[in-house]
Amino acid sequence: MTLLRLQIENLALIEHAELEMADGLNVFTGETGAGKTMLAQAIGLLAGAAPAAGMVGPHASETYVEAEFAVPEGFFDGDLPAAVNALRPDGEETLVVARRISGSGRSRAMLWGRSCARGDLEAIGELLLEISSQHEARRLALPATQLDLLDAAVGNDELRRESAAAWSALRAARAALERARADAGEAERRRGELEELAARMEEAAVADGERGRLEQERERLRHLDELTAGLGGAAALINPDDGEGALTMAARAAELVAGVQRYQPELEELAGELRDAFLRLQESGIELRAQLDGLEAEPQRLEWVESRLQLFADLERRFGGGIEALVERAADARQALDLLSEGGRLLAERERAVEDALAAADRCASQLHDAREAGAAGFARAVETELADLGMDAARLEVVLEPAELGSRGADHVR
Protein backbone atom coordinates (compact mmCIF):
# COMPACT_ATOMS: atom_id res chain seq x y z
CA MET A 1 0.00 0.00 0.00
CA THR A 2 1.17 3.57 -0.64
CA LEU A 3 -0.10 6.67 1.13
CA LEU A 4 -0.51 9.28 -1.62
CA ARG A 5 -1.86 12.26 0.34
CA LEU A 6 -3.07 13.21 3.79
CA GLN A 7 -5.44 16.10 4.57
CA ILE A 8 -6.04 17.35 8.14
CA GLU A 9 -8.53 20.02 9.22
CA ASN A 10 -8.77 21.36 12.81
CA LEU A 11 -7.01 18.49 14.57
CA ALA A 12 -5.82 19.81 17.94
CA LEU A 13 -3.44 22.68 17.08
CA ILE A 14 -3.34 21.91 13.34
CA GLU A 15 -5.73 24.29 11.58
CA HIS A 16 -5.07 22.97 8.10
CA ALA A 17 -2.47 20.65 6.61
CA GLU A 18 -2.36 18.85 3.28
CA LEU A 19 0.56 16.57 2.57
CA GLU A 20 1.42 14.88 -0.71
CA MET A 21 3.88 12.05 -0.26
CA ALA A 22 6.89 11.51 -2.48
CA ASP A 23 7.81 8.11 -3.87
CA GLY A 24 9.76 5.91 -1.49
CA LEU A 25 10.53 6.79 2.13
CA ASN A 26 9.03 9.95 3.64
CA VAL A 27 10.41 11.10 7.02
CA PHE A 28 8.89 13.70 9.36
CA THR A 29 11.20 14.98 12.06
CA GLY A 30 10.96 17.77 14.59
CA GLU A 31 11.30 18.74 18.18
CA THR A 32 8.75 17.90 20.86
CA GLY A 33 5.45 19.65 20.16
CA ALA A 34 6.07 20.07 16.44
CA GLY A 35 3.04 17.93 15.58
CA LYS A 36 4.50 14.52 14.73
CA THR A 37 2.15 12.74 17.13
CA MET A 38 -0.86 14.51 15.65
CA LEU A 39 0.06 13.16 12.22
CA ALA A 40 0.14 9.67 13.71
CA GLN A 41 -3.20 10.29 15.43
CA ALA A 42 -4.74 11.41 12.12
CA ILE A 43 -3.63 8.20 10.45
CA GLY A 44 -4.90 6.23 13.44
CA LEU A 45 -8.36 7.78 13.03
CA LEU A 46 -8.38 6.59 9.42
CA ALA A 47 -7.63 3.08 10.67
CA GLY A 48 -10.73 3.13 12.88
CA ALA A 49 -9.19 4.31 16.15
CA ALA A 50 -11.60 5.82 18.68
CA PRO A 51 -11.33 9.63 18.94
CA ALA A 52 -9.59 10.95 22.01
CA ALA A 53 -10.51 13.96 24.10
CA GLY A 54 -9.09 17.24 22.86
CA MET A 55 -8.76 16.14 19.22
CA VAL A 56 -11.21 18.75 17.91
CA GLY A 57 -9.27 21.99 17.62
CA PRO A 58 -10.40 25.57 18.23
CA HIS A 59 -10.62 26.57 14.56
CA ALA A 60 -13.93 24.86 13.67
CA SER A 61 -16.76 22.79 15.12
CA GLU A 62 -15.34 19.47 13.89
CA THR A 63 -12.17 17.66 12.90
CA TYR A 64 -11.79 16.23 9.42
CA VAL A 65 -9.09 13.81 8.27
CA GLU A 66 -8.82 12.31 4.78
CA ALA A 67 -6.24 10.14 3.03
CA GLU A 68 -5.86 8.53 -0.37
CA PHE A 69 -4.03 5.24 -0.78
CA ALA A 70 -2.73 3.47 -3.86
CA VAL A 71 -3.49 -0.22 -3.47
CA PRO A 72 -2.00 -3.25 -5.22
CA GLU A 73 -3.82 -5.13 -7.96
CA GLY A 74 -6.45 -7.47 -6.57
CA PHE A 75 -6.79 -5.58 -3.28
CA PHE A 76 -10.53 -5.07 -3.76
CA ASP A 77 -10.98 -8.79 -4.46
CA GLY A 78 -9.38 -9.79 -1.17
CA ASP A 79 -10.80 -10.07 2.33
CA LEU A 80 -12.54 -6.69 2.36
CA PRO A 81 -16.04 -6.65 3.86
CA ALA A 82 -18.75 -6.84 1.22
CA ALA A 83 -20.12 -3.53 2.51
CA VAL A 84 -16.82 -1.85 1.61
CA ASN A 85 -16.74 -3.14 -1.96
CA ALA A 86 -20.37 -2.05 -2.40
CA LEU A 87 -19.34 1.56 -1.69
CA ARG A 88 -16.54 1.68 -4.27
CA PRO A 89 -17.49 3.73 -7.37
CA ASP A 90 -17.10 1.97 -10.70
CA GLY A 91 -13.60 2.25 -12.08
CA GLU A 92 -12.11 3.67 -8.87
CA GLU A 93 -8.56 2.33 -8.46
CA THR A 94 -7.45 4.19 -5.31
CA LEU A 95 -8.87 4.04 -1.79
CA VAL A 96 -10.13 7.29 -0.21
CA VAL A 97 -10.74 7.11 3.55
CA ALA A 98 -12.05 9.92 5.77
CA ARG A 99 -13.25 10.61 9.35
CA ARG A 100 -15.27 13.48 10.80
CA ILE A 101 -15.14 14.08 14.57
CA SER A 102 -17.63 16.50 16.12
CA GLY A 103 -17.05 18.52 19.27
CA SER A 104 -19.36 16.14 21.18
CA GLY A 105 -17.08 13.22 20.31
CA ARG A 106 -19.39 11.65 17.73
CA SER A 107 -17.60 10.47 14.62
CA ARG A 108 -18.53 9.57 11.06
CA ALA A 109 -16.46 7.23 8.90
CA MET A 110 -16.45 7.51 5.10
CA LEU A 111 -15.08 5.63 2.13
CA TRP A 112 -14.99 7.48 -1.20
CA GLY A 113 -17.21 10.13 0.41
CA ARG A 114 -19.86 7.57 1.42
CA SER A 115 -20.71 6.68 4.99
CA CYS A 116 -19.48 3.36 6.36
CA ALA A 117 -19.11 1.62 9.72
CA ARG A 118 -16.09 2.34 11.89
CA GLY A 119 -15.50 -1.41 11.98
CA ASP A 120 -15.00 -1.31 8.22
CA LEU A 121 -12.17 1.18 8.74
CA GLU A 122 -10.62 -1.14 11.29
CA ALA A 123 -10.73 -4.03 8.83
CA ILE A 124 -9.20 -1.90 6.11
CA GLY A 125 -6.67 -0.33 8.46
CA GLU A 126 -5.30 -3.75 9.35
CA LEU A 127 -4.60 -4.31 5.65
CA LEU A 128 -3.44 -0.77 4.84
CA LEU A 129 -1.30 0.37 7.73
CA GLU A 130 1.66 -0.96 9.63
CA ILE A 131 2.34 1.28 12.63
CA SER A 132 5.55 0.66 14.55
CA SER A 133 6.06 2.08 18.03
CA GLN A 134 7.37 1.15 21.44
CA HIS A 135 4.31 -1.08 21.69
CA GLU A 136 5.01 -2.85 18.39
CA ALA A 137 4.97 -6.25 20.09
CA ARG A 138 1.20 -5.95 20.49
CA ARG A 139 0.84 -6.49 16.76
CA LEU A 140 2.08 -10.04 17.25
CA ALA A 141 -1.25 -10.81 18.90
CA LEU A 142 -3.17 -10.03 15.71
CA PRO A 143 -4.18 -13.22 13.84
CA ALA A 144 -3.56 -11.60 10.45
CA THR A 145 -0.04 -10.61 11.48
CA GLN A 146 0.71 -14.11 12.77
CA LEU A 147 -0.50 -15.66 9.52
CA ASP A 148 1.56 -13.22 7.43
CA LEU A 149 4.69 -13.93 9.50
CA LEU A 150 4.33 -17.67 9.08
CA ASP A 151 3.69 -17.42 5.34
CA ALA A 152 6.62 -15.06 4.86
CA ALA A 153 8.94 -17.43 6.73
CA VAL A 154 7.72 -20.50 4.83
CA GLY A 155 7.78 -18.74 1.44
CA ASN A 156 4.11 -19.02 0.55
CA ASP A 157 3.94 -15.93 -1.68
CA GLU A 158 2.98 -17.83 -4.83
CA LEU A 159 0.45 -20.01 -3.00
CA ARG A 160 -1.07 -16.90 -1.43
CA ARG A 161 -1.45 -15.29 -4.87
CA GLU A 162 -3.09 -18.43 -6.24
CA SER A 163 -5.40 -18.60 -3.24
CA ALA A 164 -6.39 -14.95 -3.63
CA ALA A 165 -7.12 -15.48 -7.35
CA ALA A 166 -9.19 -18.60 -6.61
CA TRP A 167 -11.13 -16.74 -3.92
CA SER A 168 -11.80 -13.86 -6.33
CA ALA A 169 -13.07 -16.33 -8.95
CA LEU A 170 -15.32 -17.97 -6.33
CA ARG A 171 -16.82 -14.64 -5.32
CA ALA A 172 -17.45 -13.77 -8.98
CA ALA A 173 -19.13 -17.14 -9.58
CA ARG A 174 -21.32 -16.71 -6.51
CA ALA A 175 -22.29 -13.20 -7.62
CA ALA A 176 -23.20 -14.50 -11.10
CA LEU A 177 -25.35 -17.22 -9.52
CA GLU A 178 -27.15 -14.69 -7.33
CA ARG A 179 -27.78 -12.43 -10.33
CA ALA A 180 -29.16 -15.38 -12.32
CA ARG A 181 -31.45 -16.32 -9.42
CA ALA A 182 -32.62 -12.72 -9.05
CA ASP A 183 -33.26 -12.37 -12.80
CA ALA A 184 -35.17 -15.65 -12.87
CA GLY A 185 -37.21 -14.62 -9.82
CA GLU A 186 -38.06 -11.24 -11.33
CA ALA A 187 -39.02 -12.85 -14.65
CA GLU A 188 -41.19 -15.41 -12.82
CA ARG A 189 -42.92 -12.67 -10.87
CA ARG A 190 -43.71 -10.77 -14.08
CA ARG A 191 -44.32 -13.81 -16.27
CA GLY A 192 -47.94 -12.91 -17.06
CA GLU A 193 -47.12 -9.34 -18.02
CA LEU A 194 -44.12 -10.44 -20.09
CA GLU A 195 -46.11 -13.09 -21.93
CA GLU A 196 -48.90 -10.63 -22.73
CA LEU A 197 -46.46 -7.95 -23.92
CA ALA A 198 -44.50 -10.39 -26.09
CA ALA A 199 -47.65 -11.94 -27.58
CA ARG A 200 -49.44 -8.67 -28.35
CA MET A 201 -46.36 -7.03 -29.84
CA GLU A 202 -45.66 -10.11 -31.94
CA GLU A 203 -49.25 -10.00 -33.18
CA ALA A 204 -48.98 -6.27 -33.91
CA ALA A 205 -45.75 -6.82 -35.92
CA VAL A 206 -44.75 -3.15 -35.72
CA ALA A 207 -42.29 -2.18 -38.46
CA ASP A 208 -39.44 0.25 -37.86
CA GLY A 209 -40.72 3.83 -38.29
CA GLU A 210 -44.23 2.60 -39.12
CA ARG A 211 -46.07 5.00 -36.86
CA GLY A 212 -44.61 8.09 -38.51
CA ARG A 213 -45.38 6.82 -41.98
CA LEU A 214 -48.95 5.94 -41.03
CA GLU A 215 -49.58 9.33 -39.43
CA GLN A 216 -48.34 11.03 -42.58
CA GLU A 217 -50.53 8.80 -44.76
CA ARG A 218 -53.56 9.49 -42.54
CA GLU A 219 -53.12 13.21 -43.01
CA ARG A 220 -52.99 12.74 -46.78
CA LEU A 221 -56.10 10.55 -46.87
CA ARG A 222 -58.00 12.93 -44.60
CA HIS A 223 -57.28 15.93 -46.86
CA LEU A 224 -57.73 14.48 -50.34
CA ASP A 225 -60.15 17.27 -51.32
CA GLU A 226 -57.64 19.95 -50.39
CA LEU A 227 -54.86 18.09 -52.20
CA THR A 228 -57.02 17.74 -55.33
CA ALA A 229 -57.91 21.41 -55.30
CA GLY A 230 -54.34 22.51 -54.77
CA LEU A 231 -52.76 20.25 -57.37
CA GLY A 232 -55.54 20.89 -59.93
CA GLY A 233 -55.34 24.65 -59.46
CA ALA A 234 -51.57 24.66 -59.86
CA ALA A 235 -51.74 22.48 -62.97
CA ALA A 236 -54.40 24.77 -64.50
CA LEU A 237 -52.26 27.83 -63.91
CA ILE A 238 -49.28 26.23 -65.60
CA ASN A 239 -51.01 24.53 -68.54
CA PRO A 240 -54.83 24.90 -68.59
CA ASP A 241 -57.08 22.88 -70.86
CA ASP A 242 -58.43 26.10 -72.38
CA GLY A 243 -56.60 29.37 -72.79
CA GLU A 244 -53.01 30.32 -72.05
CA GLY A 245 -51.15 29.45 -68.89
CA ALA A 246 -47.69 30.02 -67.44
CA LEU A 247 -46.18 27.39 -69.75
CA THR A 248 -47.42 29.08 -72.91
CA MET A 249 -46.37 32.50 -71.67
CA ALA A 250 -42.89 31.27 -70.75
CA ALA A 251 -42.50 29.72 -74.21
CA ARG A 252 -43.60 32.94 -75.86
CA ALA A 253 -41.21 35.03 -73.75
CA ALA A 254 -38.32 32.72 -74.63
CA GLU A 255 -39.14 33.03 -78.36
CA LEU A 256 -39.37 36.82 -78.21
CA VAL A 257 -35.98 37.24 -76.50
CA ALA A 258 -34.37 34.65 -78.81
CA GLY A 259 -35.65 36.57 -81.83
CA VAL A 260 -33.83 39.79 -80.84
CA GLN A 261 -30.67 38.45 -79.22
CA ARG A 262 -28.75 38.85 -82.49
CA TYR A 263 -29.03 42.62 -81.99
CA GLN A 264 -27.76 42.44 -78.40
CA PRO A 265 -25.51 39.38 -77.87
CA GLU A 266 -25.67 39.58 -74.08
CA LEU A 267 -29.32 38.55 -74.29
CA GLU A 268 -28.22 35.01 -75.15
CA GLU A 269 -27.91 34.04 -71.47
CA LEU A 270 -31.34 35.49 -70.66
CA ALA A 271 -32.91 33.61 -73.59
CA GLY A 272 -31.36 30.40 -72.26
CA GLU A 273 -32.78 31.00 -68.80
CA LEU A 274 -36.25 31.53 -70.26
CA ARG A 275 -35.96 28.28 -72.22
CA ASP A 276 -34.93 26.50 -68.98
CA ALA A 277 -37.91 28.06 -67.18
CA PHE A 278 -40.20 26.77 -69.93
CA LEU A 279 -38.77 23.24 -69.62
CA ARG A 280 -39.04 23.27 -65.80
CA LEU A 281 -42.64 24.47 -65.97
CA GLN A 282 -43.37 21.76 -68.51
CA GLU A 283 -41.94 19.08 -66.17
CA SER A 284 -43.79 20.54 -63.20
CA GLY A 285 -47.05 20.51 -65.12
CA ILE A 286 -46.58 16.87 -66.10
CA GLU A 287 -45.76 15.93 -62.47
CA LEU A 288 -48.78 17.85 -61.15
CA ARG A 289 -51.09 16.01 -63.58
CA ALA A 290 -49.54 12.67 -62.59
CA GLN A 291 -50.00 13.40 -58.86
CA LEU A 292 -53.56 14.55 -59.54
CA ASP A 293 -54.40 11.39 -61.48
CA GLY A 294 -53.07 9.30 -58.57
CA LEU A 295 -55.42 10.91 -56.08
CA GLU A 296 -58.59 8.99 -55.45
CA ALA A 297 -60.71 8.46 -52.40
CA GLU A 298 -59.63 5.40 -50.35
CA PRO A 299 -62.09 5.14 -47.46
CA GLN A 300 -61.10 1.53 -46.72
CA ARG A 301 -57.40 2.43 -46.61
CA LEU A 302 -58.09 5.37 -44.29
CA GLU A 303 -60.15 3.12 -42.03
CA TRP A 304 -57.29 0.59 -41.89
CA VAL A 305 -54.71 3.29 -41.11
CA GLU A 306 -56.92 4.72 -38.37
CA SER A 307 -57.41 1.28 -36.80
CA ARG A 308 -53.68 0.57 -36.97
CA LEU A 309 -52.80 3.80 -35.19
CA GLN A 310 -55.54 3.11 -32.63
CA LEU A 311 -53.90 -0.28 -31.96
CA PHE A 312 -50.61 1.49 -31.26
CA ALA A 313 -52.37 3.89 -28.85
CA ASP A 314 -54.06 0.96 -27.05
CA LEU A 315 -50.74 -0.81 -26.62
CA GLU A 316 -49.14 2.36 -25.26
CA ARG A 317 -51.93 2.83 -22.72
CA ARG A 318 -51.74 -0.81 -21.66
CA PHE A 319 -47.99 -1.10 -21.22
CA GLY A 320 -46.81 2.51 -20.99
CA GLY A 321 -44.29 4.29 -23.20
CA GLY A 322 -44.13 4.88 -26.94
CA ILE A 323 -44.64 2.15 -29.52
CA GLU A 324 -40.95 2.19 -30.49
CA ALA A 325 -39.95 1.63 -26.85
CA LEU A 326 -42.50 -1.18 -26.60
CA VAL A 327 -40.84 -2.95 -29.52
CA GLU A 328 -37.55 -2.98 -27.55
CA ARG A 329 -39.32 -4.00 -24.32
CA ALA A 330 -41.02 -6.86 -26.13
CA ALA A 331 -37.62 -8.13 -27.29
CA ASP A 332 -36.38 -7.96 -23.68
CA ALA A 333 -39.55 -9.76 -22.55
CA ARG A 334 -38.92 -12.58 -25.00
CA GLN A 335 -35.37 -12.92 -23.66
CA ALA A 336 -36.68 -13.02 -20.09
CA LEU A 337 -39.20 -15.70 -21.04
CA ASP A 338 -36.44 -17.66 -22.73
CA LEU A 339 -34.52 -17.40 -19.48
CA LEU A 340 -37.49 -18.84 -17.64
CA SER A 341 -37.86 -21.70 -20.10
CA GLU A 342 -34.14 -22.43 -19.85
CA GLY A 343 -33.79 -21.13 -16.31
CA GLY A 344 -33.10 -24.55 -14.86
CA ARG A 345 -30.26 -25.13 -17.28
CA LEU A 346 -28.76 -21.68 -16.74
CA LEU A 347 -29.01 -21.90 -12.96
CA ALA A 348 -27.48 -25.39 -13.09
CA GLU A 349 -24.56 -23.99 -15.09
CA ARG A 350 -24.08 -21.17 -12.58
CA GLU A 351 -24.27 -23.63 -9.67
CA ARG A 352 -21.68 -25.89 -11.32
CA ALA A 353 -19.46 -22.86 -11.84
CA VAL A 354 -19.71 -22.08 -8.12
CA GLU A 355 -18.95 -25.71 -7.23
CA ASP A 356 -15.91 -25.72 -9.52
CA ALA A 357 -14.66 -22.39 -8.15
CA LEU A 358 -15.21 -23.60 -4.58
CA ALA A 359 -13.28 -26.79 -5.31
CA ALA A 360 -10.42 -24.75 -6.77
CA ALA A 361 -10.37 -22.42 -3.75
CA ASP A 362 -10.45 -25.43 -1.41
CA ARG A 363 -7.50 -26.98 -3.27
CA CYS A 364 -5.49 -23.77 -2.92
CA ALA A 365 -6.44 -23.54 0.77
CA SER A 366 -5.40 -27.17 1.27
CA GLN A 367 -2.03 -26.55 -0.40
CA LEU A 368 -1.50 -23.49 1.77
CA HIS A 369 -2.42 -25.48 4.87
CA ASP A 370 0.01 -28.28 4.00
CA ALA A 371 2.80 -25.77 3.36
CA ARG A 372 2.11 -23.96 6.61
CA GLU A 373 1.93 -27.18 8.57
CA ALA A 374 5.16 -28.40 7.02
CA GLY A 375 6.98 -25.15 7.75
CA ALA A 376 5.52 -24.33 11.17
CA ALA A 377 8.03 -26.33 13.19
CA GLY A 378 11.01 -24.88 11.32
CA PHE A 379 9.63 -21.38 11.78
CA ALA A 380 9.21 -21.95 15.52
CA ARG A 381 12.76 -23.32 15.88
CA ALA A 382 14.18 -20.33 13.96
CA VAL A 383 12.41 -17.91 16.30
CA GLU A 384 13.63 -19.86 19.34
CA THR A 385 17.19 -19.55 18.01
CA GLU A 386 16.79 -15.79 17.77
CA LEU A 387 15.37 -15.68 21.29
CA ALA A 388 18.30 -17.70 22.57
CA ASP A 389 20.67 -15.13 21.09
CA LEU A 390 18.78 -12.55 23.17
CA GLY A 391 19.44 -14.52 26.36
CA MET A 392 16.11 -16.39 26.49
CA ASP A 393 17.41 -19.95 26.12
CA ALA A 394 14.34 -21.56 27.68
CA ALA A 395 11.79 -19.69 25.54
CA ARG A 396 9.66 -21.94 23.36
CA LEU A 397 7.32 -21.00 20.46
CA GLU A 398 4.43 -23.21 19.43
CA VAL A 399 2.57 -22.63 16.16
CA VAL A 400 -0.99 -23.99 16.13
CA LEU A 401 -3.07 -24.10 12.96
CA GLU A 402 -6.83 -24.16 13.35
CA PRO A 403 -9.57 -24.31 10.71
CA ALA A 404 -11.11 -20.99 9.68
CA GLU A 405 -13.67 -19.78 7.20
CA LEU A 406 -12.42 -19.90 3.62
CA GLY A 407 -11.07 -16.58 2.34
CA SER A 408 -8.40 -15.09 0.10
CA ARG A 409 -5.68 -16.31 2.53
CA GLY A 410 -6.93 -19.87 2.63
CA ALA A 411 -8.82 -21.53 5.48
CA ASP A 412 -6.38 -21.36 8.38
CA HIS A 413 -6.33 -19.50 11.67
CA VAL A 414 -2.87 -19.43 13.25
CA ARG A 415 -1.89 -18.94 16.90
Image (tube, grey):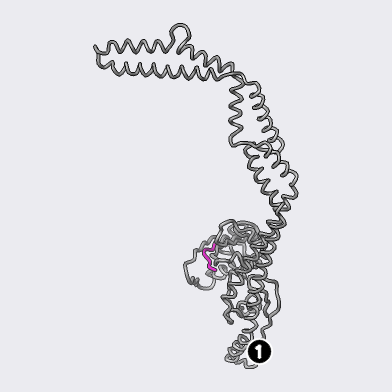
Chain part drawn in magenta: 1-6
Asked if residue 53 shows in the view, the reply is no
Expressed as whole percent of the image width and height from the top left, the position of residue 22 reads 47, 67
Residue placed most toward the observer, 173 or 198: 198
Most extreme residue toward the top is 243
Expressed as whole percent of the image width and height from the top left, the position of residue 218 reads 61, 25
- Quadrant in the rendering for residue 98: bottom right
Q: Label 1 amino acid?
A: Arg
Q: Secondary structure of the magenta portion, mostly? A: strand
Q: In the figure, is residue 327 to the left or right of 247?
A: right
At label 1, counting other C-alpha atoms closer than 10 Å, the crowd grade (few under 14, some 14-19, many 20 or more) is few
Expressed as whole percent of the image width and height from the top left, the position of residue 224 reads 59, 18
- Quadrant in the rendering for residue 148: bottom right
Q: Quadrant of the C terminus?
A: bottom right
Residue placed most toward the observer, 410 or 23: 410
Total labels drawn: 1
Asked if residue 211 shows in the view, the reply is yes
Report which residue position mark 1 lands on.
396
Queried whether the magenta region covers residue 300, the answer comes back as no
